[in-house]
Amino acid sequence: MVAVIVGLKLTLLRNGLRRSVWRIVALVIGLVYGVGIVLGCWAGLVALRFAPADLAAAVTVLGFGLLTVGWLLMSLLVFGSDETVDPAKFALLPVPARRLQPGLFLAGLIGVPGIATTLIAAGLIATWSRNPVTVVAAVITVPLGVATCSLLARTATSAFAQALSSRRFRDFAAVALALFGASIGLAINAVTNASRGFEPTVLLAILHRTGEVIGWTPIGWIWSVPAETAVGSPVIAVVKLLLAAAFLAVLWLAWRYFLSGSLTSPLESGGRTRTTVRGNLAERLFPDTPAGAIASRVLLYWRRDPRYLAAIGGICVAPIIVIVTQLINVDHGSRPVAAFAPVFISLLLGSVVTTDISYDGSALWIHVVTGVSGMADRAGRAMATAVVIGPIVVIMTVAAVLLSGEAHLFSVVLALTIGLGLIGLGVGCWAGSVWQVPVPPPGQSPFQRNNSGGLASLASMGASTGLTVIIGLPTIVLVILSYWFGWLAYLAIVVGIVSGALAIRYGVRIGGRRLEARWPEVLTRVSAKT
């Protein structure tokens, strides 16, 4: 069974690369970044081979503990877990979860993150090649540590995905994820502030203490085994090895529990079907046109689909972190930076519209067979996104300016948020007709990703954000010049609105025409599951 599932993963990966050139580009970019990160980490780990044992212990335990947490955070907030070989597809087969689990586990490590993590962890062998005992401890640590990273991420995303099948929990989840991400940023800022002004010896003592604390937590048990062996504490090393093995067993059983649930009660069957149709706010908010109908439907998705909630959290967490960290940092914080933080949402607005059509999946066939025009599709999605994200941007802009105490910056911040936001909508209307990035299928886990590893989404985000900045250069230049000529700030608002209106007009028109000429190809791309 293991060989079958791993072979299936490799086949799906190969076929996915053959079907889309963008996945090849994303894979190449991921490999380039992965190789660079691996080489940099290996250089540091080899250098630690010649450092004192206590310093190497503190650095490796802290670094690999953060790597483990990074797997968890990136799975929940950015990439999700790799479900190219979707467990729900095995629901109709008489195969229990315990037989699928080993194959799914190994298949999940086939990809840039899994391979890079394994190679980086192998660098511990170089760090602890001080005597045969530490080498053996490092060799044992590498597979168990990589397994801990992968299983922790899989268990957390599986648990959270099943919880999101409850609509009531989805609203709580969006807020919880935003607060969780913000708390991480605040914690990093607090540590950075606390470390300023300390003597090197004090910082070194803090590093040692932090490494010791992490070494006694579940994320650091396995990584501190060779460190304890090197500093002359073999008994503690054995204790931590047993604790790490027990933690792995708990994660394995917990993942099996959630995997069994996905085999017997797939997420797509969790909702109730309404038998009545009635007017609602979304239907009354937009005009009675094809574009208005599409906007109403998309607006309902924003309310009910966990994938859209994840998108809101993804673009709102960063500016919240910037605002709070800059305001609480009295000595080194920048209040103007806090005031301009909401501009980040406007910059990412294009990527949100770009991805929207991919969320439809195979349901997009309705647009094709009913003759919906591409312009109506583009306009409807832009209207729905503006209704959802627009108030968030306005509220955050006012709050950032008021909390920062930089009221004189309100006009320039408003020029950038409005101008770049409207331009982002127009860019997204065009980019969505060009790139259909892989997303989790409707009804599936919002933390699921396919074999592209989320790199295609990052490439699309970078392209749409860069194009938004290029088109918005007139507004940006006027904002910069307004520091010397204040009246230019009001001109920047006008230029931003005009530029945004033109971007939306031509984005809807060009993107709509491209969709109409390529509806079958677009439907094929958004319907692909791998």
Image (cartoon, grey):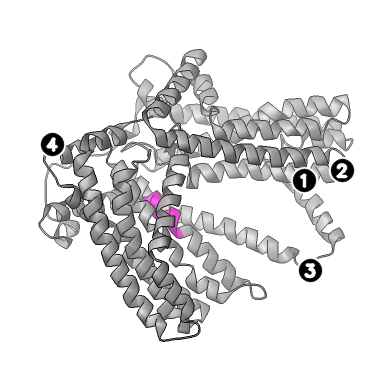
Residue 13 position within the rendered picture, expressed as x and y whole percent measured from the top left: 45, 25
Q: Secondary structure at mark 4?
A: helix
Q: Which residue is mark 1?
A: 59
Residue 298 position within the rendered picture, expressed as x and y whole percent measured from the top left: 24, 51
Q: Which mark is residue 486?
A: none
Q: Give the CA distance from mark 1 to mark 2.
A: 10 Å
Pick the quarter of the image with the C terminus. Answer: top left
Give the foreground label among 3 and 2: 2
Q: Which residue is mark 2?
A: 51
Visible residue check, residue 387: no
Q: Is residue 102 above or below residue 52?
A: above
Examine the residues drawn in magenta and state their main secondary structure.
helix
Identify the amino acid type marked 2: Ala
Q: Which residue is mark 4?
A: 369
Q: Give the CA distance from mark 1 to mark 3.
A: 21 Å
Q: Residues within 10 Å of mark 3 (few under 14, many from 20)?
A: few
**Of label 3 and label 2, which has the lower sequence position?**
2
**What segment is highlighted magenta in the picture?**
309-316
Identify the amino acid type marked 1: Val
Q: Give the CA distance from mark 4 to mark 3.
A: 67 Å
Q: Which residue is mark 3?
A: 197
Q: Give the CA distance from mark 1 to mark 4.
A: 59 Å
**Of label 1 and label 4, which has the lower sequence position?**
1
Q: Nearer the viewer, residue 338 or 233?
A: 338
Asked whether 312 falls inside the magenta stretch, the response is yes
Q: Residue at x 23, y 60 (%)?
A: 505
354 horizontally vs 40: left or right: left
Q: Residues within 10 Å of mark 1 (few under 14, many from 20)?
A: some
Residue 279 position within the rendered picture, expressed as x and y whole percent measured from the top left: 12, 55
Q: Residue at x 64, y 75 (%)?
A: 330
Give the foreground label among 4 and 3: 4
